[in-house]
């Protein structure tokens, strides 16, 4: 897996998310500059999967701003779409690795949102 593959995955995935009946409205209402947001997501996944250190942000804070909209069902739906696109773009081993990582991140975000909302 390399930066080019990760960028392709992110770009294809979020193109699908933007059209998705459940996720699209949340993302399209929130993100006004998709080019900038996709660059941020490229950096995030490069940092997570390739330890590039390019991402300088706080995913928990970003998701907390939308906690009323983020249900466990939406996280599960996001993961299904993510896995689908990962299998299209990456080798089977890389797709499994990035899906496992995304699942851990989703679980962590959900727990953080639950904890702070309580």
Image (cartoon, rainbow, N blue to C red):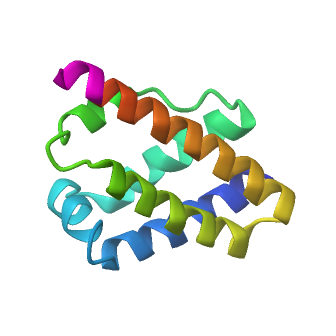
Q: Main secondary structure of the magenta part?
A: helix
Span highlighted in magenta in the image: 114-118
Q: Is residue 58 magenta?
A: no
The residue drawn where x is 74% and y is 37% is 50
Q: Nearer the viewer, residue 97 or 7?
A: 97
Give the residue at x 33% y 76%: 20
The residue nearer to you, when weighing 87 against 37, is 87
From the viewer's perspective, is 72 left or right of 83?
A: left
Quadrant including the C terminus: top left
105 or 54: which is nearer to us? Answer: 105
Q: Is residue 36 left or right of residue 1?
A: left
Where residue 47 sits in the image (x, y, percent)? 62, 34
Visible residue check, residue 64: yes
Q: Position of residue 37 (x, y in %)?
A: 36, 51
Give me the residue at 46% from left, 50% from top.
39
Residue 36 seen in the figure: no
Instruction: Decide which of 104, 2 is in the foreground and name it.
Output: 104
How many discs appear? 0
Tell me residue 117's x, y (percent).
Answer: 18, 25
Q: Which quadrant would residue 30 be assigned to in this image?
A: bottom left
In the rendered image, residue 56, in percent from the top left (x then y), is placed at 46, 26
Image-quadrant location for residue 58: top left
Q: Is residue 18 left or right of residue 108?
A: left
The residue depicted at 23 percent of the width and 20 percent of the height is 116
Q: Classify residue 65 as left or right of residue 60.
A: left
User: Within the magenta stretch, is there residue 116?
Assistant: yes
């Amino acid at each position: 897996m390399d930066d080019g593959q990760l960028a392709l995955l992110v770009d294809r995935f979020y193109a699908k998310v933007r059209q998705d009946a459940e996720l699209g409205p949340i993302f399209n209402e929130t993100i006004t500059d998709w080019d900038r947001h996709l660059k941020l997501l490229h950096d995030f996944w490069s940092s997570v999967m390739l330890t590039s250190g390019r991402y300088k942000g706080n995913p928990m804070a970003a998701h907390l701003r939308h906690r009323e909209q983020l249900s466990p069902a939406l996280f599960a739906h996001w993961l299904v779409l993510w896995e689908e696109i990962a299998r299209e773009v990456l080798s089977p081993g890389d797709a499994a690795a990035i899906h496992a990582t995304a699942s851990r991140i989703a679980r962590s975000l959900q727990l953080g949102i639950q904890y702070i909302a309580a």
